[in-house]
Amino acid sequence: MIHRPDFAWPAVLGPLVITLAVSGCVPASADPAPSSSTASTPATSATTPARGARPAPTKSPRRVSGPAAARPSTSAASVGGPAPTVRPGAAVTTLATLSVKGRAPRTGYDRAEFGQAWADVDRNGCDTRNDILRRDLRSLVLKAGTRGCLVLRGTLHDPYTGTTIGFVRGQSTSSAVQVDHVVALSDAWQKGAQRWTSQQRTAFANDPLNLLAVDGPTNQRKSDGDAATWLPPRKAFRCSYVARQVAVKAKYGVWVTSAERAAILRVLGTCPGQGLPSAGVIRLGGGRVEAVASTPAPARTTPATVVAPPASSGTDPRYGTCREANAAGYGPYRRGVDPEYDWYQDRDHDGLVCER
């Protein structure tokens, strides 16, 4: 059963509260008190004339039609301009459906509780990280032989900072672009995910609705913060950002704290019509395919551990261990997708080797 506490709407959202109250989205206790100019309606004053007063002249009678709620108002909300329009299904109305509770302890949290990192949940033959890179990057260059899965290069127009970042796959360069969990896994763990099954947590960690390719250092600064402790530096993206958090939390039943709800309300007060995002199917391909030539391994202190690459074209160099392959910027490899998979030992039998 979802607990819907009464809202203490900020005064800056007065017009928004009036609009939501008419539609029944806000509890009656949150309704603003009527102003003196609207305490009595024209219809009431017409039926209760002052004692001894003569009937008013009929020079310009005020005709009222329809329910009283539809009549023009001279309250403080209308004096400042028309009330903002809130679309059905807008983020602010969905926020009202989320439970509000305190943050549970972080005890027991571990990334492994949310399954293998970047699992192929949609079973399209490609890991989630590369799915998101293909969706969010432009001018893609894809690795040949991966059926349009693996991104070698691309350009990110970072939503968090507004900067443009060139992505180049490699051990020392891939981290420039990171895939962020908009609702952090640790945050979800402290707000309901502890009670989920492992399948539910894996689905949550790999749901495209909850994932964005972003600037790596900015993502590191965000850490596992919620809207009460962190918002994107680029203010123009904040409405979209908190709307995505609301959509994810509503989908999975993750609750919010009172401070978090207040922070989201402050942002949505500037964009009351902000809709909720959706996540479509991410298809393979969408960029230029490039074969990666097999080149000799770089000079190393232990060259004997490097095995000559096979004669087939388009494959990575073959190393003695996954650690060496990772150090040179290669991996991971998937069973049935990458020919390099068969060169290494899949110790955990998860269909992935040389994961980083």
Image (cartoon, rainbow, N blue to C red):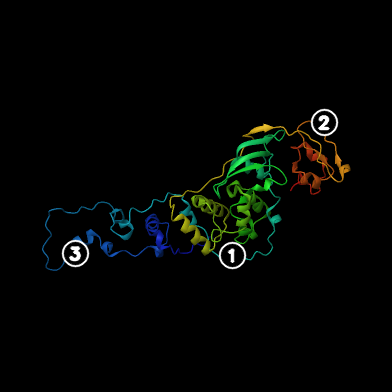
Q: Residue, x 66% and y 45% (percent of image)?
A: 129
Question: Closer to the camera, 204 or 325?
Answer: 325
Question: Which comes before the other along the chain, label 3 or label 1?
Answer: 3
Residue that badge 2 annotates: 311
Residue 217 in view: yes
Mark 1: secondary structure? loop
**Image quarter hosting the N terminus:** bottom right
> Which amino acid is tagged 3?
Thr
Across and down, in percent, residue 237 comes to: 51, 50
Question: Which comes before the other along the chain, label 1 or label 2?
Answer: 1
Q: Within 10 angstroms of label 3, few (less than 14), some, or many (20 or more) residues? A: few
Q: Is residue 155 left or right of residue 96?
A: right
Query: Which quarter of the picture shows residue 73?
Result: bottom left
Query: In whole angstroms, how far apart are the C-alphas of marks 2 and 3?
Result: 99 Å
Mark 2: secondary structure? loop
Give above or below for 274 relative to 314: below
Q: Residue, x 49% and y 61% (percent of image)?
A: 262
Q: Which mark is residue 118?
A: none
Mark 3: secondary structure? loop
Q: Which mark is residue 103?
A: 1
Q: Within 10 angstroms of label 1, few (less than 14), some, or many (20 or more) residues? A: some
* Viewer-side label of 2, 3: 2
Give above or below for 310 relative to 97: above
Residue that badge 3 annotates: 48
Q: Residue furthest right?
A: 304
* Viewer-side label of 1, 2: 2
Query: Which quarter of the picture shows residue 151?
Result: top right
> Which amino acid is tagged 1?
Arg
* Viewer-side label of 3, 1: 1
- Asked whether disc 1 touches disc 2, contact meaning CB atoms under 8 Å apart, the reply is no
